[in-house]
Image (spheres, rainbow, N blue to C red):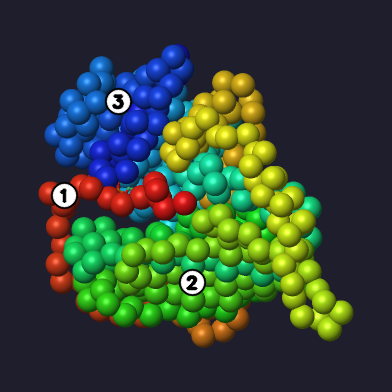
Amino acid sequence: MLRVMIVGAGAIAPSHIEGFLSFPDRVSIQVIANPTVSKAKTLIEKYSLKADAVGSFEEGLDRVDIVSICSPPSTHRDIAVQALRAGKHVLLEKPMAMSVQQCDEILEAAREGHALLSVVSQIRFIDSIARTCDLIRSGNYGKLLFSQINTFWYRGQSYFDLYWRGLWNVEGGGCTLNHAVHHIDLLLWLTGMPAELTGFLSNLNHQNSEEEDISLSVLRYKDGSMAQINTSLIHHGEVQKLDFQMEKAGISIPFDVRCSKVRSNGFPMDDEDMLREMTAHFESFKPLEHEHHTGQIQNFLDAIEEGVPLKVSGIDGRNAIELISGIYKSAFTKKTVTFPLEKDDPYTHFPSRVEEAPRFHKKTRSVKAFDDTTITSFKGKF
Ligand SMILES: NC(=O)c1ccc[n+]([C@@H]2O[C@H](COP(=O)([O-])OP(=O)(O)OC[C@H]3O[C@@H](n4cnc5c(N)ncnc54)[C@H](O)[C@@H]3O)[C@@H](O)[C@H]2O)c1
């Protein structure tokens, strides 16, 4: 039986707890750590856990095999490094860390401690997304030419009142780092790292945040193919769309597929045969047993117990941070950025990564926690 400690008893912690509770024969939650211990106790009561509430993760480290990190991004490096060095397997919430250099420290700690590290990217474990990605990754429908990632979310003004949000030095970035990171991970899983990108940022409607609430980036890959990452917190209805144009077909998330064949004059007509083939491929995919965080936790446990490959590794988490650091570098310097970023590039380090950041607004309101801890999630959107 693997023993788990949840670190951070805030909004995302229930997704981890419910995920682990789905595997009662394999894991048991032994400790919840949170500086305000009463928050840990509340979760223990809510889920009727036989666990201890502690004020710091160090108090629980010796008693567990797995550390599930649900604390704010600025704490990720220190907690992950200490846990991994102690040989604990770590499930780490996104974003992996505040800089590429911090990600490298975490990866090094995993090597030193011979421990597994998975960075949360629960959308890879949404059934319809996994199916769509299987079609793209199969290569059956030709080369991927153009990807468009629209992370269109909506957050009101008060979202940035939480003490660690809205400050470049604490949160590390706005919607590009903390929201688009999900879809950026997905894009990089399909395409790998681009050769270069140009990015733009602005803050259009969040006066209690120094950071961006919108960012638009254009990416070019070594083979000439291109992508666009558009991220915002101002989109009413949060209509998400990820679109992938391959040589033989276009496919979108939420699932939609279009196939064109060509008339002799170059104009398109629908390719019904290809459409049928792709729909059959989509429908033949073995349904995921568990989705979202629970799906990722299942894979994490399989990796620990049976040695199966992790579907989302620490390297994946690092790649997303490198790409995002590139978007910030390009936007702040108003230049096209090439990859990989050099190890001594200030944009791979924190806080130098945010030194040049435009302060869009001054943060004037700050609360330690919200009374209402309900958050919207990907559930039901795809
Ligand atoms: N995967 C997702 O869909 C998703 C959704 C929301 C948040 N997140 C991520 O989860 C993390 C937490 O976000 P949240 O919304 O739950 O924040 P939150 O502020 O609601 O909760 C964080 C909790 O961590 C505690 N904490 C702070 N420092 C700590 C430390 N050193 N040790 C232990 N606990 C500590 C805080 O007191 C708080 O209770 C962030 O990295 C965020 O980006 C992921």
Report the side of 259 relative to 382 (left or right). right
Q: What SS does tag 1 mark?
A: loop
Report the side of 238 relative to 164 (left or right). right
The image quadrant that residue 13 belongs to is: top left
Ranked by sequence position, the earlier of labels 2 and 3 is 3
Along the line of sight, the residue nearer the viewer: 334 or 180: 180
Q: In the drawing, what numbered circle is on residue 31?
A: 3
User: How much space separates mark 2 and mark 3, taking CA atoms?
Assistant: 39 Å
Along the line of sight, the residue nearer the viewer: 143 or 319: 143
The image quadrant that residue 292 belongs to is: top left
Q: What SS does tag 3 mark?
A: strand
Measuring from the top left, give residue 114's x and y in whole percent.
58, 30
Q: Is residue 24 above or below residue 120?
A: above
User: How much space separates mark 3 and mark 1, taking CA atoms?
Assistant: 24 Å
The residue singled out by tag 1 in the image is 372
Q: Are marks 3 and 1 in contact (CB under 8 Å)?
A: no
Measuring from the top left, give residue 330's x and y in whole percent.
53, 78
Residue type at numbered disc 3: Val
Q: Residue at x 47, y 44 (%)?
A: 122
The residue singled out by tag 2 in the image is 230
